[in-house]
Image (spheres, grey):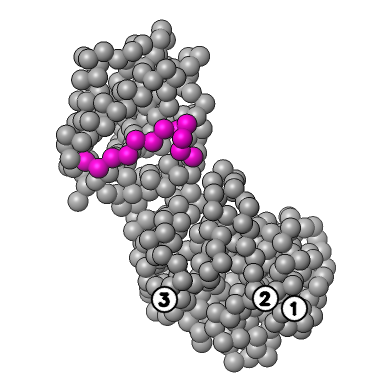
Amino acid sequence: MMPIEIKKDIYHVGVVDWNIRDFHGYSTYKGTSYNAYLALDDKKALFDTVKKPFCGQLLHNIRKVVDPRSIDYLIVNHVEMDHSGSIPEVIEAIQPEKVFCSTMGKKALEAHFGSQRWPLEVVKSGQEISLGSRTVRFLETRMLHWPDSMFSYIPEEKLLISNDAFGQHWATSETFDDQVALSELMRHAAKYYANILLPYSPLVQKLLATVSESGLEIETIAPDHGIIWRSQPKAILEAYDTWSRQESQAKALIIYDTMWHSTEKMAHAVASGLAEEGVSYKVLSLKHNHRSDVMTEVLDSRALLFGCPTLNNGMLPTMADMLCYLKGLKPANKIATAFGSYGWSGEAVKLITQQLQEMKLDVLEPGLRVQYVPDHEALAQCVELGRQVGRAVKESTP
């Protein structure tokens, strides 16, 4: 990837990772990028680095713009290793006067790399440094999504360098939002939010309020992953407002796995009941849909119906995996229930229901169990379960 000038004398010098397919449980089937930014002024500043295997590419990109030794400052907005992995090599290459980070960033750097003789300087929210004709203002964003996270804002350019917020895991040869289809861009942004930032939604709301109250003018948002928002930053800010409120549509998800197709038959009968109530739905088999893609659909769904047969007095591993993943992401404002077939013990529905209750979802109990293969009467009960959920969705969705 060539350096791209995103503002006069401010360059994107990051790299594209075309081959990554898993990001700690998140399916990155279209790769990702590790974005870093270089500002040239009286003082030259590099904002973030890249994952360790890509350090050579980062330094190569920098050399196409300036001699790395001429860089004065390294600004570390986030210490997660996809952005900090190459910091030791970068510091060795550029020999910065100062390395700026948050209070928690300093602790994280020392925890990751030991007590180095690096010129670390802690900055706090509202603090500014001068590059010459430009200023960098820092905004701590703790737990979005690590304790060390912060934004860097350049007011003269109305440029927000937002580390992991507003990003997407998407490898492209394009750099800006107006160079790609907005609909696809928003799908990647939604998946990113659903799988990374959803549990921190209350903090996102506070951050958006802080930005609004401070009158921060934002013309361009440059995240550490994916596409830069230069034409429609308002679109992603509005989307984050909606997603962080956990607002739902009149939509239901049937999330299931099956052994001998009995639970699958139940799932389709439940779908018929939803259809009779005029509620939009998707039927998602866990054999064919990755947990992170299911989670993306959860983001704007009002109802979640989990179907699973009983295996060894428990549930199928795919369902256990999905529920564990879902619980960590803390969805809210959802109606939920469970259904499934069983042979002789039938614990799966009860166990799923317990987990849904622990997530503090609005659970319709006791769920629905059918022994062995569902007959006409059992399928009618499944249809009725779908109708019941459909009515609840309509009653609770504006």
Tell me the quarter of the picture where residue 13 sits: bottom right
Residue 394 placed where, x, y %?
18, 42
Q: Tell me the residue that label 1 is attached to.
A: 63
Q: Which residue is more in the foreground, 349 or 125?
A: 349
Give residue 111's mark: none
Q: Earlier in the sequence, mark 1 or mark 2?
A: 2
Question: Which secondary structure, mark 3?
Answer: loop
**Position of residue 119 in the picture relative to residue 30 (left or right):** right
Image coordinates for residue 156, horizontal then vertical, percent: 51, 87
Three-letter code, disc 1:
Arg
Q: Amino acid at mark 2?
A: Leu
Compared to 314, does 272 lie above or below?
below
Q: Is residue 72 visible?
A: no
**Neighbour tally class for label 3: few under 14, some 14-19, many 20 plus, Cα within 10 Å:** some
Q: CA distance from mark 1 to mark 2?
A: 12 Å
Residue 362 vs 86, above or below: the answer is above
Measuring 37% from the left and 30% from the top, which residue is drawn there? Answer: 306
In x, y percent, where is residue 378?
25, 16
